[in-house]
Image (cartoon, rainbow, N blue to C red):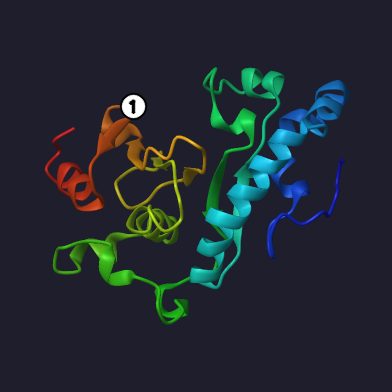
């Protein structure tokens, strides 16, 4: 399995979904990381096909996977949640590759859905902020279980986003970072999250 180029979708492979620098430093851990169960591979394929690939297509730009599948031991070593969806192949931490700008957006990218405001908040979004905003706006269409604005120093500038596709279909929108007090905060909508962040209402 290690280094397998097997494609899960047009632009995502098993190899990038199991990659881990931490696991590679320990041969036994890397061996386990490279042997996901069949049900995990099926979940990774659903995640790539139904959620990640549509995002990649919308942006017309590479979407990079920081962390995809984690075997139980890898998840423990990096301090992941004990019931992390990463361990089931249902989640990935992703970011846009360097170089994407708003003018690269393809026709149909729902930029107008980022905020109900005047556009001021749209201008504050980094590329990863746009990735989060679009995933949040299309949470139903992408069949997202939950999408999380992860870290970064403010709303609209996540270090990466956590996105999952799973059977629970909770459609949860969350954020965590210093600006949330270091705890997960849930909001009903992207506009509500922006309002809370702007008003320091966490």
- Vertical arrangement, residue 29 with respect to residue 126, above or below: above
Q: Residue at x 63, y 28 (%)?
A: 87
Q: Percent from the top left, x then y, of residue 34?
A: 82, 34
10 Å crowding of disc 1: few (<14), some (14-19), many (20+): few
Q: Percent from the top left, x then y, of residue 101?
A: 45, 72
Q: Nearer the viewer, residue 125 or 166?
A: 166
Residue at numbered disc 1: 182
Q: Percent from the top left, x then y, of residue 191?
A: 20, 53
Q: Residue at x 58, y 61 (%)?
A: 53
Give left or right: position of 130 versus 20.
left
Q: Residue at x 55, y 69 (%)?
A: 57
Quarter that holds the N terminus: top right
Q: Residue at x 15, y 38 (%)?
A: 200
Give left or right: position of 10 versus 178.
right
Quarter that holds the C terminus: top left
Q: Nearer the viewer, residue 43 or 179?
A: 43
Q: Nearer the viewer, residue 76 or 108?
A: 108
Task: Tell me which corner region of the image, top left, top right, bottom left or bottom right, holds residue 60.
Answer: bottom right
One can see residue 19 in this view: no
Q: Percent from the top left, x then y, of residue 174?
A: 33, 38
Q: Residue furthest front?
A: 167
One can see residue 189 in this view: yes
């Amino acid at each position: 399995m290690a280094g397998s180029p097997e494609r899960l979708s047009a632009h995502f492979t098993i190899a990038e979904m199991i990659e881990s620098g931490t696991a590679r430093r320990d041969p036994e851990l890397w061996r386990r990381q490279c042997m996901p169960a069949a049900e995990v591979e099926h979940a990774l394929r659903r995640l790539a096909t139904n959620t990640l690939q549509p995002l990649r297509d919308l942006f017309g730009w590479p979407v990079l996977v920081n962390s995809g599948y984690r075997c139980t031991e890898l998840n423990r070593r990096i301090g992941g949640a004990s019931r992390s969806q990463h361990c089931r192949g249902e989640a990935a931490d992703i970011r846009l590759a360097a170089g994407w700008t708003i003018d690269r957006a393809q026709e149909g990218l729902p930029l107008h859905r980022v905020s109900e405001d005047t556009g001021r908040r749209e201008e504050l979004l980094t590329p990863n902020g746009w990735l989060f905003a679009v995933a949040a706006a299309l949470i139903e269409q992408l069949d997202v279980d939950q999408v999380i604005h992860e870290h970064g120093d403010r709303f609209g500038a996540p270090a990466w986003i956590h996105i999952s596709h799973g059977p629970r279909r909770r459609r949860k929108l969350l954020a965590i970072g210093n600006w949330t007090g270091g705890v997960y905060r849930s909001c009903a909508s992207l506009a509500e999250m922006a309002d809370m962040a702007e008003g320091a209402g966490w």
